[in-house]
Amino acid sequence: MPTPHAEPAARRTAHAEPAARRTVSFLGDAPLWTRNDALVAVGAAALDLIGFTLSSQDAQGFVPVTGCLLMTVSGLALLARRRAPVLTFVAVLALGLVVHLSWPVGQGLNASMIVVLYSVVRARSAAVYVPAVLASAVLPLAVRAPWSQGSLLKLAGNGAAVLFVIAAGLVMNRWQQEVETHRRLLAERAVADERRRIAREMHDIVAHHVTTMQLMAGGARANLDRNPEIARDALVTLEGLGRTALHEMRQLLDVLRAEGETREASTAPQPGIADLDRIVAESCAAGLPTEFDVRGAPRRLPEGMQLTVFRVVQEALTNARKHAGSGARARVCLTYGDHETTVDVRDDGEGTAGGSVPVPGSGYGLIGMRERVALHGGSLWTGRSEGQGYRVTARLPLPKEEGALR
């Protein structure tokens, strides 16, 4: 009975923390800014300082220290753009207007204004970011009266810049929504896959053990008066099967514990090819004489593939005991080929011929077998044998790195 040692994908995603968001926190566990925010703020402040220095030197012949300080503060204000994008925009706009009123510098959008506008577009609706972009494009020009033809050209340049910022923000918002939707779908698919896996395991445990226990109990009851020794052996086997079923059910329920509850990983080995002898012996004890044959050189298979072989044989023999009828015999053949491992289970019963008896493997057992085999890139065939009875054949391709046992 396999017990997953890793959390489902949805839970892993919820617990993961991107490296870019690991920052120094000044308010408990909530960071004021991220490392990327700091890099953006420093970069924007540096660009604005360079632009202000060149513009001031060209227009006045010197660089105002106060203006440099204001440009630096404007850039560093971007550290708060994720938490308070609108307030950060107001601060950057106000500092920019002070600079434009005090010194004859360029009236286009600086780096800090472009970054904070992008943050407002990303975080707020059109009712908020449209007035913000209009104010950023017009106010730096409005404070420098009178207007001229050059002012109109600068207004056109500012308008093109803010349109580009809006487009970039909207495209990024759309992309982020698609990413979140895709991530949610992957999480839901992971949960659904886990539920199907648990359902397969539950079906295998209940269908095999309970069916065998039912047959053993019926045999013990039939021989209780005529042959008590046979009845006693059947009851001993029945007790062992019940203990095994209870153990496997307990392992499965451990997987379903509530989130956050401590769970130790199970150290019990998964059923595999080495357990096929036990399954065949249980089938014989339950009243279905079964032969087991191994062909080819045994190979060391992955645990998952061994579990698939075990479950296919278990389910096929369980169906044979239920549907093959009295007097039937079964045969299990495990073949190691050069490129694949084949397991073939067939019976010679007549139970599937009558219309009143359901076809073996037509329900959840067949679905579970197909899903298990498909996980390893194999194929499953079920149907009537050449003569009479029913046959289940699974072909599993061998991994290239696996070699024969020495």
Image (cartoon, rainbow, N blue to C red):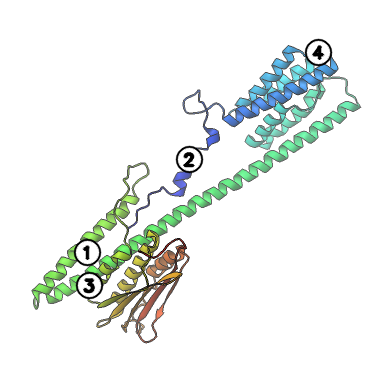
Q: Residue 215 carries which label?
A: 3
Three-letter amino acid code at the position of disc 3? Leu
Residue 309 placement (x, y as % from top left): 37, 67
Q: Position of residue 185 (x, y in %)?
A: 53, 52
Q: Nearer the viewer, mark 3 or mark 1?
A: 1
> What quarter of the picture does the C terminus occupy?
bottom left
Q: Do the residues labelled 3 and 4 touch (CB within 8 Å)?
A: no
Q: Which of marks 3 and 2 is nearer the N terminus?
A: 2
Residue appearing at x 33%, y 60% in the figure: 202
Q: Position of residue 148 (x, y in %)?
A: 90, 24
**Residue that mark 2 sits on:** 16
- Amino acid bearing label 1: Leu
Q: Measure the alpha-carbon separation of dots 3 and 2.
A: 50 Å
In the displayed structure image, the side of residue 290 where residue 61 appears, left or right: right
Residue 322 relative to residue 238: left or right: right
Q: In which quarter of the image is the N terminus?
A: bottom left
Residue 241 numbered tag: 1
Residue 24 visible to an observer of this rendering: yes
Give how far across and how far down residue 291 sits, in percent.
28, 77
Badge 4 or badge 1: first in the primary sequence = 4
Mark 3 neighbour class, 10 Å CA radius: few under 14, some 14 to 19, many 20 or more = many
Mark sitting earlier along the chain (1/2): 2
- The residue drawn where x is 47% and y is 42% is 14
Q: Residues within 10 Å of mark 1 (few under 14, many from 20)?
A: some
Report whether residue 82 is seen: no
